Amino acid sequence: MASKHILVSNDLATRIQSGMYPAGSRMPSESQLIQEYGVSRDTLRKALAVLEQEGYIQKARGREALVLDREKVVFPVSGLTSFQELAEAEGYHTRTRVVVLESVRGNRELMKALDITRDEEAWRLYRVREIEGERVILDKDFLSRKYVPRLREENCTGSLYRYLEGELGLKIGCAQKEITACRPTEEDRRYLDVGKNDIVIVVRSYVYLESGALFQHTESRHRWDRFRFVDFARRVRV
C-alpha cells in the first residue's frame, strides 16, 4: 500500500487536473488540508513536496501554494535537447517552418557571435516553431560553415542536431546559455502569435563541439505563456 503522503499527493493532483484547483489559484491552507485528510503536518508537507517536484504547485513561505499551469511545455535549461526531440518525447503536434536560410559573411553580429573573421562564412537560419497550431518559438541559428559546410531546408525542418551528428558526424559537447525577457520586436510579431504587450523569453546559446570549438550561436525567442523553463541544480560544498 502506498504511503500516506503519496495517497494525499495523488488525490490533490486529481483535484488540480479536474480543475477543482485551477492554474493561478491558491491551494487551501496547510491547516485546512491537515484537517480534511486527517494527517500530520509532516505528512502533508511531504505530499506537497511531491506535487511541487512534479510541477503541479509552487510553494512559498508563509502563503498557500500556487497552482501552476501544466499545459505549458517543460523546456529544460540544462542539456542540449533539440525542439524536435523534446516535442517527440512529450507527444505534441508540431510543425517547423524555415523562413530564412542563407550563407553570409562580413556581418559584424555574426563575426562576434561565432568568433569568426570577416572572410569566413556562416549559415543564418530562422525557423518558426508551431505547437498545436500556434506559432510559439522563433529560433535564430547561426552556424559556422567551417563545421557545417552544407545545409538544406529539409535538414532543418526536423531535428537539426540529428543531421549535424548523424550526417556530418559532428560531436556536440556543451553550451553556455543566457536567459532574458523582453517586449516583442516587430520581427517577433511578424513570426509569432504574440500581442504588443506580451513578453518574449529569449534563450541565447553558444554551442561548442567536444573539441572546444564554437560552431553555433542560437537566439531562441519563446512566447512566455507556453513554456516553463526548468533546471536541476546540485549543491556543491566549498
Image: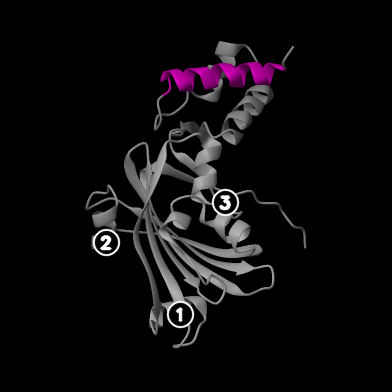
Q: Position of residue 89 (x, y in %)?
A: 56, 38
| For discs 1 and 3, the disc positioned in front in the rendered view | 1
Which residue occupies the foreground of this view, 169 or 216?
A: 169
Regarding mark 3 in the picture, which secondary structure is present there?
loop
Nearer-N-terminus badge (1/3) = 3
Asked whether disc 3 touches disc 2, contact meaning CB atoms under 8 Å apart, the reply is no
Q: Residue 81 shows which numbered tag?
A: 3
Q: CA distance from mark 1 to mark 3?
A: 26 Å
Magenta stretch, main secondary structure class: helix
Query: Which is more toward the observer, 84 or 203?
Result: 84
Q: Secondary structure at mark 1?
A: strand
Label 1 or label 2, whichever comes before in sequence order = 1
Which of the two residues, 64 or 189, is positioned nearer the viewer here?
A: 189
Residue 5, by quadrant, is top right
Q: Position of residue 82 (x, y in %)?
A: 53, 52
Instruction: Tell me the distance, in whole angstroms, between the alpha carbons under discs 3 and 2.
Output: 25 Å
Residue situated in front as seen by the camera: 219 or 178: 219
Which residue is found at the position 54% from the left and 63% from the top? 177
Residue 61 shows up from this direction? no
| Magenta span includes 128 | no
Q: Which residues are magenta?
A: 3-21
Q: Which residue is mark 1?
A: 121
Image x and y of residue 88, in percent: 52, 39
1 sits left or right of 112 in the view: right
Horizontally, residue 19 falls left or right of residue 45, namely left
Task: Tell me: residue 220, above or below residue 107.
Answer: above
* Label 2 sits on residue: 187
Q: Secondary structure at mark 2?
A: helix
Q: Is residue 217 left or right of residue 234?
A: left
* Quarter of image, res 220: bottom left
Q: Is residue 15 visible?
A: yes
